[in-house]
Image: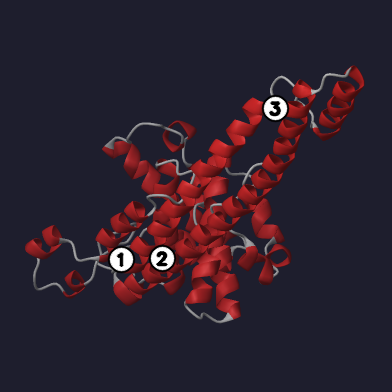
Amino acid sequence: MQEKFNFYSSVNLKSYNLDQTMRYQLQTLERLDRFTRVHSENVANLVCRMCEYLHCPKAFTVYATICGYLHDIGKLYIPPEILGKPDKLTPEEFEVMKTHTTLGYELCMKDLSLRPYALGALNHHEALNGTGYPNGISKSQIPYEAQIIRVADEYDAIVTKRQYKTHVNISETLRDLIKDAQPDPKFLALDQLAENSKVGKINKKVLRVLFKVVIDDTLYEISGIMEYINYLKDQIKRLEMIDKYHAKMEKAKKEKDKNYYLEGIKFLLQPSETVENYAQILNEYRDAIITREFRIKQLYNEIEIIKKLKA
C-alpha cells in the first residue's frame, strides 16, 4: 500500500452529477491529446470547486464547469509540433498557439450542443487589464466563467510545468498568480490615465477562493499520508512480532522449539518477505514513517503560509 492523493479531488464534481450532463461534451475531449485532455479535466475540476466557494448558483456552476472542460478544445487544430513543443515557443509559434481561442469558439459555434460554451473557449486568455487575447477586452467585458477559468488554467499550467508531486512549496505557485492579480507597473507607466490600469490580469476574488481549494487539497493529501502512516504502524507491529519470534528462535536450544518459532515467523511473513530480509523491511518502514511525518509538518506549514497570502 502507498499513500494516495489526487492533486485535484473530484468529490465536488460528483455532487453535480456532471457525468450525465456532459456525456456529449466529454466525447469531444477524447479527440484531444492526452496532455491537453488531462489539463482540461483539471481545469474543470478546479472551476467547479471554485464556483462552490464563490456561492454560484448550481446551474451556473454546471455551465462554467463544462466551459472549463472545453476551454482548450481549439487546440485540436494546433499543429502537433507546436502544441507538444517542449521548448519555449518562438514569437511566430506563439501567435499560432493563440489562435486556439478563436478556433475553439468557431468549433463550438458550429455545433448546437457545444454552442452555449463558446465564450469560455474564446475568452479564457483575456485579462482584466486588457492585455489578454484574442480581443484585448477588459473587466466586465470578460464573461465571469472565463475569469474563473483563467485562474484555474494558469494554476494548473504552473503545477504541471513544475511537476509537483506534493503540495509542499505550492505557495510559490500562488505567489506567482498574485503577481497577475496586481496592476502591471509597466502597463501603468505606459498609460496612467487608462481606466483598466487599476486592476491586474486576473480576478482577485476568484484567486482568493483558489487559495481555499488548494488548502482543501493539501488537507486531503495530509489525510492520505496519515492513512498510510497508520498502515505502516500496523506492519511494524507485525514485523516486531516476527523479530521477537526470531530472537526466541535464536536462543532456543531444542530443535522442536526452533521449528515452533520458525513456523510462527512464516505465518506472519507476507509475500516478498523472508526470514533474511524482514529486519531490513522493518527499518525501511520506520524510516518511511519519519519521512511522512516530516512531510505532514511541511504541509501544515504550507497551509499557514497560504492563509497569510494576500491577493
- Write down the residue under mark 1: 309
Residue 56 in the image: above or below residue 89: below
Q: Nearer the viewer, mark 1 or mark 3?
A: 3
Q: Do tag 1 and tag 2 residues touch (Cβ < 8 Å)?
A: yes
The colour scheme of the drawn protein is: secondary structure
Rounded to the nearest angstrom, the CA distance separating label 1 from label 2 is: 9 Å
Instruction: State the image quarter where residue 152 is shown.
Output: bottom left
Q: Amino acid at mark 3?
A: Tyr
| Residue 22 in picture, x, y percent from top left | 67, 63
Residue 86 in the image: above or below residue 183: above
Rounded to the nearest angstrom, the CA distance separating label 1 from label 3 is: 46 Å
| Residue 175 in picture, x, y percent from top left | 30, 57
Instruction: State the image quarter where residue 2 is shown.
Output: top right
122 relative position to 22: left or right: left
Q: Amino acid at mark 2?
A: Phe
Q: Tell which circle, 3 or 2, labels the residue nearer the N-terminal end.
A: 2
181 relative position to 72: left or right: left
Q: Tell which circle, 1 or 2, labels the residue nearer the N-terminal end.
A: 2
| Residue 210 in picture, x, y percent from top left | 43, 65
Q: Choose between 197 and 266: the one closer to the eye.
A: 266
Mark number displayed over residue 194? none
- Write down the residue under mark 2: 211
- Write down the residue under mark 3: 278
